[in-house]
Image (cartoon, helix red, strand yellow):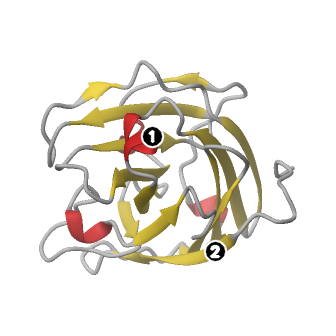
């Protein structure tokens, strides 16, 4: 069941695109609905359509922090300020309800666990043709929310199939190999003051 949210919340649905070098015959599409869930929280609803039986899905029944979730099927969100000096944050959400949060001082530099991150509210459901994951994250512990209310988001997903092949999906891909951290991937803007996406 998807978490409830304010009827006045601004919503936007965006499509993730597969990296040209990592197609997946099992995945038809991945969409993400983004909305503000009150205060400094953002809700992300990831919906993957395709042959779910052909995918490897991590299993679990409780939300807990875990590392290296990107090595298997995982949905991701990167958050940066409009004028952030290169700092950004990474959030990972697995179908097992495991999660992770990291802080970076610059592009792929200074990575450390974001201890201040609160456990996101995660719910997962799937059937033969659809996998849905909802994650609500509170951005209040992130200094950039207080210092720079206009945020830039990069949304992405890693999808692993039963043959252990990984497909990489993002709003935008820079030239070359898949790279979710690249500045070109941060294409979605959120104004936390005006509640617009």
Marker count (numbered): 2
Which residue corresponds to mark 2? 12
Q: Residue at x 34, y 52 (%)?
A: 80
Q: Position of residue 54 (x, y in %)?
A: 57, 62
Is residue 91 shown to the viewer in this render? Answer: no
What is the residue that sits farthest to the top in this orientation?
115
Q: Residues within 10 Å of mark 1 (few under 14, many from 20)?
A: some
Q: Seen in the image, is 76 located left or right of residue 130?
A: left
Residue at point 45%, 43% (across, down):
145
* Residue depicted at x 39% and y 34%: 143
- The residue tagged with tag 1: helix, strand or loop? helix
The x and y percentages for residue 28 are 57, 80
Residue found 47% across the figure and 58% down from its top? 161
Q: Position of residue 91 (x, y in %)?
A: 45, 41
Query: Is 29 located above or below residue 109 in the figure?
Result: below
Q: Which residue is mark 1?
A: 146
The answer to whether residue 110 is seen in the rendering is yes
- The answer to which of 101 and 153 lies nearer the viewer is 153
């Amino acid at each position: 069941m998807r978490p409830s949210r304010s009827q006045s919340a601004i919503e936007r649905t965006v499509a993730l695109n597969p990296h040209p070098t990592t197609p997946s015959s099992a995945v038809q599409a991945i969409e993400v609905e983004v909305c503000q869930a009150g205060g400094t929280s953002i809700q992300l609803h990831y919906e993957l359509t395709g042959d779910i039986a052909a995918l490897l899905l991590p299993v679990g029944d409780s939300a807990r922090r875990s590392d290296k979730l990107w090595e298997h099927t995982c949905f991701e969100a990167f958050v940066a300020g409009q004028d952030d000096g290169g700092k950004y944050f990474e959030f990972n959400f697995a179908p097992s309800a495991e999660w992770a949060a990291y802080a970076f001082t610059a592009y792929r530099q200074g990575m450390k666990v974001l201890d201040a991150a609160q456990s996101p509210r995660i719910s997962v459901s799937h059937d033969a043709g659809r996998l849905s994951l909802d994650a609500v994250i509170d951005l209040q512990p992130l200094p950039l929310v207080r210092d720079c209310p206009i945020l830039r988001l990069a949304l992405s997903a890693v999808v692993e199939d039963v043959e252990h092949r990984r497909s990489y999906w993002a709003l935008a891909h820079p030239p070359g190999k898949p790279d979710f951290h690249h500045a070109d991937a941060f294409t979605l803007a959120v104004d936390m003051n005006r509640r617009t996406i």
